[in-house]
Amino acid sequence: MAKTTEMMDTARAAGATDAAGATGAAASDGSSAAAGRRAAGEASEGGAWDLAEIRAQFPILSREVNGHPLAYLDNAASSQQPLRVLNRVERYLRREHANVHRGVHQLSAEATEAYEGARRSVAAHAGTTDPSEIVFTRGTTEAVNLVASSWGDAFIGAGDEIVLTKMEHHSNLVPWQLLAGRTGCDLRFVDVTPGGTLDLDDFDRLLGKRTRLVACTHVSNSLGTVNPVREVVNRAHAAGALTLIDGAQAAPHMLTDVAKTGCDFYAFSSHKMCGPTGVGALWARRELLEEMPPYQGGGEMISDVRLEGSSWAKVPHKFEAGTPNISGVVGFGEAARFLADLGPEAIAAHEGVLKRAVLDRLDEIEGLHLYGPREERTAVFSFTYGDIHPHDLSTILDQRGVAIRAGHHCNQPLMDHYGISATARASFFFYNSPREVDALCDGLALAAEVFGGIA
Ligand code: PMP
């Protein structure tokens, strides 16, 4: 039962303090972290990474589901929000709300400062020193659609080529299919190896004189594969193409240094990195944003409006038409600061320990097929288990309080590539505990008993 907890005790050298999930279940708010630790009988060593303290900042992690402590392993779909973010949004709504960039009154000034302060925090997270390179959107999906509509309609024509990969989320595929429908450009798809990595030889074969853009995910939401984006960007640039990186699954887990990556566009979502839903960001090089036409028209994005025509506000406001999701943006900024305070290295160290523990445990389960590579991956695990349908697996696990996702994960072409229609997916974040690895594996053992069919 506590096998993974034991295994991870030996891994503390990596910087992760193991304070088991029962701790999180006992603590319900920031102030009860110490009480939670006592309840779990596990004193914090006061190390750099205090999992009990961290879990205590996420009220939802202390709830029960179907009579069991919640083990939330659906973080690739959406992560949970800490008190710091919830409190910041509440303070904004209670004390600071007004429309932004409009009034000269005190509340409008405070709301504008909260909104633009969030832009600075999100810019720092993305690794740019210029906050005006951050455009707030509804999320990764809208960020990709913005580029496909604005840049794509302006600079792509019939016969031009856009190179994508077979592991793209539908959000980084369908907008390009729509652009192809509008312009007559061609889409090419980089193959995925049986091991779940990009086939870079195939990529080289697809790059050509007509390639205008390479759009590629940083981390696969199904396979967990961390793609070699620097290499992808270098090869694309050598062929004269621009690059868009879908960072939805990378931004929560690793330093998103757009300057180091060298890409031209980078898209990510707040709700996968401890922030609210319905908000995200597009980072783009300033020159590109300057030359791109507006995405949508309306208030906020204009400089001067006459009946005969209009001129545009400066970047990034040119791309933010209408009243934005101000409270969402404020929460997004707080989430970026929260992750920065935890430290990307510490986050990666804890997730690395969890990842190795899960890999070891899943390896031991006969009949379980895990997709994706062993190295260069995040703690996202897509698998099938004998003949048990992923939805049945998910249902059994849910009865034990374990939340995983079952389905095609908005990756239907990737599922086709593997000749399957769905997988079960368990995805971990920095607040997950060894006890939750045990809960997952115990639930899988129960599913095998209930359904049989394990080859
Ligand atoms: N790309 C990837 C790799 C994702 O995992 C997701 C979310 N599942 C998206 C894009 C879309 O993100 P959002 O729904 O926040 O726009």
Image (cartoon, rainbow, N blue to C red):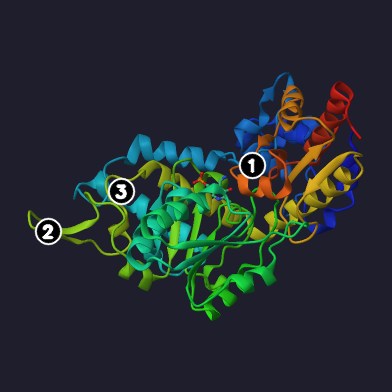
Lateral position of residue 336 relative to residue 326, left or right:
right
Look at label 1 and name its amino acid.
Asn
Q: Which residue is mark 3?
A: 110
Tell me the quadrant of the picture where the N terminus can be found: top right
Label 1 with label 2: CB-CB less than 8 Å: no
Which residue is farthest top?
A: 67
Q: Name the residue rendered at 64%, 30% in the picture.
A: 28
Number of marks in the rendered image: 3
Name the foreground residue: 131 vs 111: 131
Q: Is residue 275 above or below residue 316?
A: above
Quarter occupied by residue 434: top right
Q: Which mark is residue 25?
A: none
Front tag of 3 and 2: 2
Q: Which mark is residue 309?
A: 2
Look at label 2 and name its amino acid.
Gly
Label 3 with label 2: CB-CB less than 8 Å: no
Element on which disc 2 rests: strand
